[in-house]
Structures are given as C-alpha cells and as structure tokens.
Image: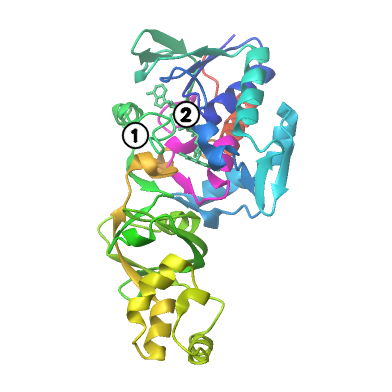
Amino acid sequence: MRKIVIVGAGASGVYLSVLLKQKYPQDDVIVLEQNQSPLKKLLATGNGRCNLSNQNMDQQYYDSDNLDIVQSIIQDFDMVSQMKEIGLYCLYQGHLLYPKSEQALSVKNVLMQRAQEAGVLFFYEQEVHRIECQNQYRIVTSKQTFHADIVILAMGSEAGKLSGMNESRYHILKQLQLKVIEPLPSLVQFYTSPVLKVLKGVRVKGTFSLMENDKCIHQEKGELLFTDYGVSGIAVMQLSSFYKKHHQYQLYIDFFDELSHNQLCQYLSQQSSLFLEGMLNHKIASYFQKYQDLPIQKLAFLLKHYRLDIQGIREAQYAQVMKGGLSLEDVTYDLELKRYPSMFAIGEILNVAGMCGGYNLHFALASAYRVAQAIERNVYVKNS
Ligand SMILES: Cc1cc2nc3c(=O)[nH]c(=O)nc-3n(C[C@H](O)[C@H](O)[C@H](O)COP(=O)(O)OP(=O)(O)OC[C@H]3O[C@@H](n4cnc5c(N)ncnc54)[C@H](O)[C@@H]3O)c2cc1C
C-alpha cells in the first residue's frame, strides 16, 4: 500500500485523486486543501458554466517555457471521452466544450461523487507550509504532518482569489529550491488612459489591437466592455495574455472593422449630417459627436483607430490565470520533478497559461491524466 498526497483540491488535484484511487483502491490517496471546501475556482469558471476545452487545441494558445511538453500533454488527452468515463456528458457549442448541464456545479458534483465512491480522503483547512524529503516525503501543514511515497503539487495560482491570495504555494517551491518564474496576472482587464467613464457599461463589437511602438503585437476581433477603470471583455482578456511588464502598450479600437477606411469615408460622406447616432451605440455616438467638425477622412481614421494608452493590467484577484509559476525546466515530460523522484506537479502551479476558451481547464485535467499514466507505469514509485 502506497501513500499518495495531493496538495490542492482544485480541478487538477481532485481529478487526479479520482483517477488514482479508482485504479489503486488499496493505496491511500489524500488531498490536502487550505480552503474549507474543494473546487472553489472551478465553480466560477465560464461564468458558472465551465468551459472545459476547445476544439482548436494547440500549443499556440499557451504561454510556457516549454511548449513541447505542453503540446505532448494537451494532445494526449481527449476531454470528451475522459469526462464520459467519470459520468460527465459534455457537448461542443461552436469550438467551446461545456458540460451538457452548462453548470460548473455538475462538474464539481461528478468529481466529488467519484472521489467519495472511490474513497479519496480530503483534509480541509490544511495549508501546506513545507515539504521535506527524507526516506519518505513529509508534508507539513498548519495543523499536522503527513507522510507520502508520492507527492503531487496541485496548488494552482492566486488568480481570481478563490484559491487563496497567499504565497505559500510559491514558498513550498522555493524551499524545494525549484525555479519559479515570476507570476503575472493574465486573462485580465486593462487600466487605460483616458478612462472613458461616460461609456461605463457599454459593450462594443469590433477589432482591438495591442500596439507597441506602432507595431501590432496581437489583434482580437470580439467584444470590449468600457468600465470605470479602463476596459474589460473577452477580447481584452485575450490581449492581456500578450502583455509584458515594463512595456508601453496602446489599445487601438476599430469600431467599424467590417468597412475599409475608404468604405467608411464613403458611407459618412453620403450622410446629410454627421450624425453618428444611426451608426453606433447611443453613448459612443454622443461621445464622438465632439469630433463632428473633423474632415471625414480624419473622423473615419479616428473611428477605426481609436487609441487608449494602457496603464497596466489589473491585479491577480481579477485575473483568470497567472502566467509564471514552476518552470518546466524542473520537470520531465511526465511532470515528475527532476530533483525529487515520485514528486509531480500538475495544473496552474506550472508555468503554463492558456488563452480564454477552455485551454486552462484542458491543461489542468490533461496534466493530471499524464501523471496518472506515469504512476500507472509504476516506474516512478518510491518504496512501493
Ligand atoms: C473567474 C475564472 C473563470 C475561469 N474560467 C475558465 C474557463 O471557463 N475555462 C478554463 O479553461 N479556465 C478557466 N479559468 C482558469 C481555470 O479555472 C484554472 O486554470 C484551473 O481551475 C486551475 O486548476 P488547478 O487545479 O491547477 O488550480 P486551482 O483551481 O487554483 O486549485 C488549486 C487548489 O490548491 C489549493 N492550495 C494552494 N496552495 C495551497 C497550500 N499551500 N496548501 C493547501 N492547499 C493549497 C487552493 O486553495 C486551491 O483549492 C477561470 C479562472 C477564473 C478565476
């Protein structure tokens, strides 16, 4: 009988606990969680609907220091059939995969039901402070010490604050002398200058470009939301994944991406007066009314290249994911730590951050699956 301790009851940790305990009922599978309950972040995903995966699954939608490992993990995992195995019926809506119920709660209930049936042991309000390596691993929490033959680091990130804003996850890595890439919020809103407070709450569809020194870093077609601090919306969240610290970026808004500059000029020139009400949301039209005396060429340019300076990204508690975390330099393709046999890392604690669209949950579950397979091959098990 082996003792397997998983640190963190997020999506990756709970899914791995199910896979392991179903396969090895004789082993002790223990999950240590600092919160009072499991899967808090999962419940908030996809606005409560849980976007589990994406039909366009490829490393190009991820940021990491080893995209080859990421590619090998994401392509080896078939979310639909693996979820079916545990009793979760999923359906694609366009490219996006959701549970048929469209409720993150179903995902939580299915995972926890399977874990309970299999006999996984959960310990809550147990913040792990450090892990010591002796003959066995010693996992020291705020309340007690656990021993394990196999340890899984599944501590996620502070993004969204539902997995805790504390630093203990990074302290554990540093105390183990592992390389930690500085965590930075991603899939997050921008602070802008000016802040268009008069447009607060207005959503606009268009094309949005992240610019640096007149160079387009990335372009997104989609929706933007004006807020009282800057801008939000899916297109902005996607752009934020290209944001780097200490760079000066601008956001260009193309309100009429369906028209070329010349077509827009032509349309504007056919209007009896430059009354934008018939062309744009009322609040945006009112805002642009101050430019009505501009020559049509200039007005058209402004409507297709409206510029906001980006003053920064919002903080981790507003983000969906953190870039950074445990460097993939320190792990094998099986996500085993090179320095620590039988210790693995899965999910968002790793330096792997996906774009919006189910990429982060796909990686969280796929990485758990990879580790379950590695343990199944049994070559990694200490003292078994
Ligand atoms: C608002 C929001 C919406 C999102 N929507 C989507 C979506 O629709 N699709 C998608 O793919 N992704 C989405 N994501 C991202 C996705 O939820 C995460 O990438 C994924 O849940 C990460 O899973 P994880 O198991 O690695 O980590 P987490 O879910 O962060 O879980 C880690 C667990 O470890 C615990 N822990 C941490 N440190 C310790 C410690 N020292 N001791 C004990 N326990 C500890 C935490 O409390 C937590 O329960 C969203 C994120 C947010 C915040």
Which of marks 1 and 2 precedes in the sequence?
A: 2
Please name the residue shown 49% across and 72% down the image: 280
Q: Assign the C terminus to one quadrant of the image.
A: top right
Q: Residues within 10 Å of mark 1 (few under 14, many from 20)?
A: some
Left or right position of 194 against 100: left
- Rendered location of residue 132, percent (x, y): 35, 17
Residue 178: mark in rendering = 1
Residue 346: tell me if it is visible. Answer: no
Work out how far the residue at label 2 is from the one at label 1, CA to CA, in angstroms.
15 Å
- Rendered location of residue 312, percent (x, y): 29, 55
Look at mark 2 in the image and give the residue it sits on.
Answer: 154
Residue 149: tell me if it is visible. Answer: yes
Q: Which residues are magenta?
A: 337-365
Residue 343: mark in rendering = none
**Amino acid at circle 1:** Leu
What is the quadrant of residue 252 in the picture?
Answer: bottom left
Helix, strand or loop at disc 2?
loop
Helix, strand or loop at disc 1?
loop
The answer to whether 362 is drawn above or below residue 129 in the figure is: below
Please name the residue shown 39% across and 13% down the image: 138
Mark 2 or 1: the one toward you: 2
Left or right position of 35 against 58: left
The answer to whether 302 is drawn above or below residue 240 in the figure is: below
